Image (tube, rainbow, N blue to C red):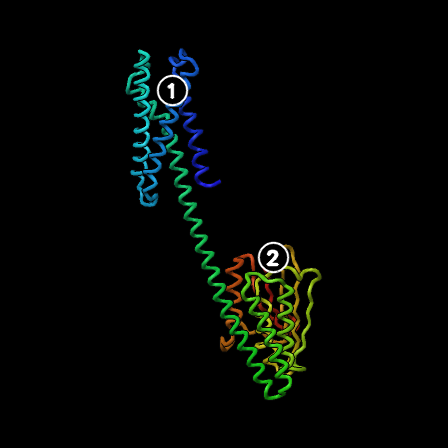
């Protein structure tokens, strides 16, 4: 329900109730029902129109700039204004009928008391509506900032990946020109896929795995027998949506800081499986993880990954990298899907 509908769904029933209360004097019982209905309509119309005018005036003031004293004065002044209108109507009505059931002051105070709840509820509605709007604007701004940051991080990630791949091809051109040409073809396919994934907020696991296989195949040309890899993927999870460029970031780290640092090379195992409402992605490679490396060169990939996970999922996602008992390094991501 939008605000206008909510306002009128509160406004009309409220003044109907006030109108019914206004014709409950015993003297009204001597009038026929049509006359009572006419007077009731006058009460309803005056209350609805005058309160709507009050709403139009009061909405020119920012609730954040209203002091507590002003807040009370607004309610009292509105109640006194509409109470006075009702009292004048009562006075004219009862004069015509040749009786006035209460003193003018008592009738005036009773009318203020009758309409005062409307002002209390109206201001409650207004303040809640105002702060809900402000909260919605904050959420919108935060989401826009979040998307902007994610795009920024992904834009940093693609050049980082390209830099690593070109370094590999550069080394290969010296050793084997034929394989270098093949790797350039693979790189073009790899870049096309990675750029397509980089434009998405979510990517299918099957696309991420395809990118991972292409990347490892490209690196296999450079490392030859020094690099072996295997995939251990749970069945029927290829269509799960995940944050793009996650596996590839882990693989870049495993190749550069793991396999690339060992003369004898090693093996990389990529695994993915479902655990409760989360998908677990892991990359295990031969090597030793140093939490405090001598240089932070090349650390942009993992740092971006941490930031992206935090922006996308908050505390619902986690990223860990640690040494295992099998003399390997395990990088593991858990995220909702």
State the residue in front, 78 or 267. 78
Which of the 4 image quadrants contains residue 221? bottom right
Q: Which residue is mark 2?
A: 337
**Foreground mark, 1 or 2?**
1
State the residue in front, 87 or 108. 87
Say if 5 sits above or below 216 in the image: above
Q: Secondary structure at mark 2?
A: loop
Is 319 left, or right, of 140 in this rendering? right
Say if 137 sits above or below 1 in the image: below
Q: Farthest residue toward the right?
A: 235
Q: Position of residue 117 (x, y in %)?
A: 39, 30
Say if 311 sits above or below 251 in the image: above
Q: Residue at x 38, y 33 (%)?
A: 120
Q: Which residue is mark 1?
A: 39
Q: CA distance from mark 1 to mark 2?
A: 63 Å
Is 209 left, or right, of 142 in this rendering? right
Q: Residues within 10 Å of mark 2 (few under 14, many from 20)?
A: few
The earlier-in-sequence mark between 1 and 2 is: 1
Q: Residues within 10 Å of mark 1 (few under 14, many from 20)?
A: many
């Amino acid at each position: 329900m939008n605000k206008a509908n909510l306002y009128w769904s509160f406004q009309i029933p409220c003044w109907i109730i006030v109108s019914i209360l206004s014709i409950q004097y015993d003297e009204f019982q001597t009038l026929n029902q049509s006359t009572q209905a006419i007077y009731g309509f006058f009460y309803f119309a005056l209350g609805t129109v005058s309160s709507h005018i009050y709403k139009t005036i009061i909405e020119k003031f920012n609730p954040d700039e209203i002091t507590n004293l002003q807040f009370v004065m607004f309610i009292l002044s509105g109640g006194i204004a509409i109470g006075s209108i009702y009292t004048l109507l009562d006075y004219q009505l009862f004069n015509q009928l040749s009786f006035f059931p209460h003193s003018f002051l008592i009738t005036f105070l009773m009318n203020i008391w009758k309409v005062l709840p409307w002002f209390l509820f109206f201001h409650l509605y207004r303040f809640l509506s105002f702060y809900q709007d402000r909260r919605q604007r904050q959420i919108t701004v935060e989401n826009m900032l979040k998307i902007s940051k994610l795009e920024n991080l992904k834009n940093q990630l693609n050049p980082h990946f390209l830099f690593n791949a070109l370094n590999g091809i550069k080394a290969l051109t010296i050793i084997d020109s034929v394989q270098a040409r093949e790797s350039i073809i693979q790189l073009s396919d790899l870049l096309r896929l990675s750029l397509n994934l980089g434009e998405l907020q979510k990517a299918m696991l099957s696309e991420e795995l395809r990118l991972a296989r292409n990347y490892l195949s490209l690196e296999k040309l450079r490392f030859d027998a020094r690099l072996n890899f295997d995939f251990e993927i749970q069945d029927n999870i290829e269509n799960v949506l995940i944050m793009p460029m996650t596996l590839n970031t882990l693989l870049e780290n495993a190749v550069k800081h793991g396999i690339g640092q060992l003369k004898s090379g090693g093996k990389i195992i990529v695994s993915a499986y479902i655990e409760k409402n989360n998908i677990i992605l892991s990359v295990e490679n031969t090597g030793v993880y140093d939490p405090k490396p001598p240089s932070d060169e090349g650390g942009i990939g993992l740092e971006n990954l941490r930031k992206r996970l935090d922006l996308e999922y908050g505390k619902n996602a986690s990223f860990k990298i640690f040494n295992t008992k099998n003399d390997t390094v395990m990088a593991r991501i858990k995220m909702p899907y």
